[in-house]
Amino acid sequence: MAAPAVHAHPHPNHPPLSPEVEALVIEVIGRVADKWTMIVLEVLIEHGEQRFSRIAELSNGISQKMLTQTLRQMERDGLVIRTVHPVIPPRVEYRLTEMGFTLSEAFCGVWMWAEANFDRIGKARQAFDAAKAAG
């Protein structure tokens, strides 16, 4: 079997990526950059292990269907652990895995960047909107 082709890495100081790794990166970024994944991640970082209903309460505006899909995908990707406690009625809790915590650390930089550039982004948007309106 031939070795997989290697693609350039988006950052010049990193080694090239194989097509398989590149495809995984694109897939994972698309999923974890999803609004609800980020919100659930933040809820579990701030509040620790939580029941489904409490995650829903803390994730302002998420539907039960979307929360179910988000938690299922996060579990599939190894970001959360779902624990079913053998009581009646069953109690189900979710907590971040080590990988979930490291993802949170990675996205912390995005939050810090957004905070540091809040005013600049606002001014850029105003300038863009003004130019569009004028033009």
Image: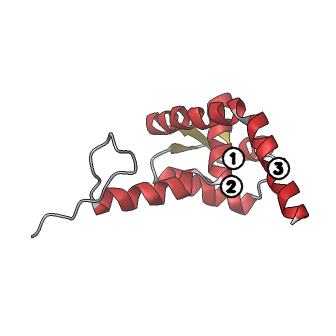
Q: Are marks 1 and 2 in contact (CB under 8 Å)?
A: yes
Task: Report the Cα–Cα distance between label 3 and label 2.
Answer: 37 Å
Task: Report the Cα–Cα distance between label 1 and label 2.
Answer: 8 Å
Find residue 8 and report its image quarter. Answer: bottom left
Please give the residue where the numbered disc 2 appears in the rendered image.
67
Q: Quadrant of the N terminus?
A: bottom left
Task: Report the Cα–Cα distance between label 1 and label 3.
Answer: 42 Å
Toward the viewer: 92 or 41?
A: 41
Q: Position of residue 39 (x, y in %)?
A: 68, 44
Against 125, is 109 above or below? above
Q: For this view, does 8 lie left or right of residue 91?
A: left
Q: Amino acid at mark 2?
A: Leu
Is label 1 in a helix, a strand or a loop?
Answer: helix
Q: Amino acid at mark 3?
A: Ala
Q: Quadrant of the C terminus?
A: bottom right
Q: For this view, does 106 lie left or right of residue 39?
A: left
Please give the residue where the numbered disc 1 appears in the rendered image.
52
Toward the viewer: 3 or 104?
A: 3
Query: Residue 127 — which label?
Result: 3
Q: Position of residue 83 (x, y in %)?
A: 54, 43
